[in-house]
Image (spheres, grey):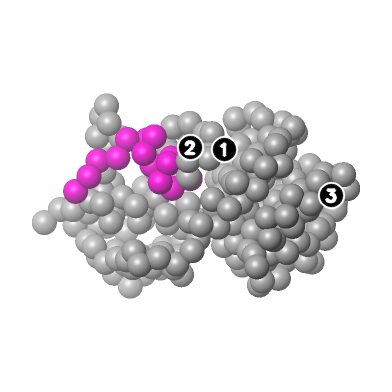
Amino acid sequence: MAKLLIADDNPQIISILKSYAEKEGFDCVSAEDGFDVLNKMTDDIDCVLLDVMMPKLDGFSVCREIRKTSQVPIIMVTARGEDYEKIMGLDIGADDYVVKPFSPAEVMARVKAILRRMEPSSNKSALSIGGLHLDLEGYQVTYQGNPISLTKKETELLFTLASNHTRAFDRESLLNQVWGYSYYGDSRTVDAHMTRLRAKLDAFEHPHFNLKTIWGVGYKFEVIE
């Protein structure tokens, strides 16, 4: 049974989401402020529904704190749907974004979709190419033995490109593969992540690979012999 942490300062919303989640077979824990969320974050939490406008400590700050020690899936929940807030939430490590008012059934569908993507599969989760070593299970990236500090999404983006280095990806394909079909973002999210990813990789000379922009298409991991 997957364990879901539902964080919102509105007891009615917690009650509704908890009711739907328990019908779907989830074990639920609730929190009504940011510090309460952090206190209840344990290793057995499988997914977090995190309200942005939390008292004491807002959802963005909570997300940052969780990401220091955990890669647990986080779905941000907010009453405001501005693009910059969505992008900021995703950039600091959230996996998805839901805007109030929402359908509880849709929220549960998003939770299940994210947990399905987290399930172990037979797909290769480690890759060495051009001096890079990527471990997707441990979210560790090194170049010639030197650790590179990447966010969860930066790691997934790099792994997707490098493991399909014969292919050029358009932005929509990267949004679908890295952020998931349920993310209603736009290409600026991909571009922003690519800019930061390039900056971190460019801290090292890497003559055997390049993150290449294919004009009119998108991006490609180019292997250089």
Q: Tell me which segment is drawn in magenta.
A: 166-179
Q: Closest to the observer: 214 or 72?
A: 72
- The picture quadrant where one finds residue 207 is bottom left
Residue 139, above or below 180: below
Q: Residue furthest front?
A: 23
Name the residue at 68% across, 60% down.
Answer: 25
Q: Is residue 143 left or right of residue 208?
A: right
Q: Which residue is mark 3?
A: 15
Q: Which residue is mark 2?
A: 189
As shown in the figure, which amino acid type bears the numbered disc 1? Ile
Provide residue 16's location: percent of width, then percent of height.
81, 46
> Is the magenta region chiefly helix, strand or loop?
helix
Name the residue at 39% across, 34% down.
Answer: 172
> Could you tell me which quadrant the N terminus lies in?
bottom right
Q: Which residue is mark 1?
A: 87
Q: Is residue 175 left or right of residue 105?
A: left
Front of the two marks 3 and 1: 3
Contact, mark 3 vs mark 2 (Cβ under 8 Å)? no
> Could you tell me which quadrant the C terminus lies in?
bottom left
Name the residue at 32% across, 58% down.
Answer: 204
Query: Label 3, label 2: how many angstroms apart (C-alpha)?
Result: 33 Å
Contact, mark 2 vs mark 1 (Cβ under 8 Å)? yes
Mark 3 or 1 closer to N-term?
3
Packing grade of label 3 (10 A; few <14, some 14-19, many >=20) is few
As shown in the figure, which amino acid type bears the numbered disc 3? Ser
Task: State yes or no: residue 209 in magenta.
Answer: no
